[in-house]
Image: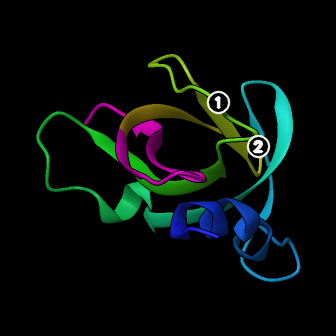
Amino acid sequence: MTLKESMVNDISLFLNNEEFAEAITYNGVEITAVFELQQDRNDNDFALSGQAAIADVYVSKNDVATVSRTDKVIKDGITYRFRYIADEDPAMWHLIFGGKETVL
């Protein structure tokens, strides 16, 4: 078995909701993902254009086959909009989302 095949087979270890992962809504569908809030809106006040909460979201490529600029995640009733792809491997996407945007 290759490393690439092992990564795909082991995705359930990372997306186990009893360990790191939790349920989120991705484009209207509930999936299991790792959602890490990196900075809340109140911690992100260095920009003159406004504030936003920034989150790293790790999802399985089985759940999210392709990524689009219009993708949305809902977590705890807050909508986060897709910003960019931070990284990917054969099994997972590492995506950056922003939410709770305000204008100063």
**Quadrant location, the N terminus:** bottom right
Q: Is residue 23 highlighted in magenta?
A: no
- In the picture, measured across the screen, residue 55 lies left or right of residue 20, that is left
Q: Which residue is mark 2?
A: 77
Disc on res. 15: none
Circle 1 residues within 10 Å: few <14, some 14–19, many ≥20: few
Q: Residue furthest bottom?
A: 19
Q: Quadrant of residue 13?
A: bottom right
Q: How is the image coloured?
A: rainbow
The percent position of residue 99, horizontal first and vertical second, equals 49, 40
Q: Quadrant of residue 69?
A: top left
The percent position of residue 67, horizontal first and vertical second, equals 52, 27
Which span of residues is magenta-colored?
A: 85-104
For this rendering, which residue is in front, 90 or 13?
A: 90
Q: Which secondary structure type mostly characterizes the magenta part of the structure? A: strand
Looking at the image, residue 64 lies above or below residue 9 = above
Q: Secondary structure at mark 1?
A: loop
The percent position of residue 65, horizontal first and vertical second, equals 64, 30
Image point (64%, 50%), residue name: 59
Circle 2 residues within 10 Å: few <14, some 14–19, many ≥20: few
For this rendering, which residue is in front, 102 or 55?
A: 55
- In the picture, measured across the screen, residue 43 lies left or right of residue 56, that is left
**Quadrant location, the C terminus:** top left
Residue type beneath disc 2: Gly
Residue type beneath disc 1: Ala
N-term-proximal mark, 1 vs 2: 1
Single out the mark in the foreground, 1 or 2: 1
Q: Which residue is mark 1?
A: 65
Image point (80%, 68%), residue name: 12
Looking at the image, residue 45 lies above or below residue 67 = below
Looking at the image, residue 59 lies above or below residue 29 = below
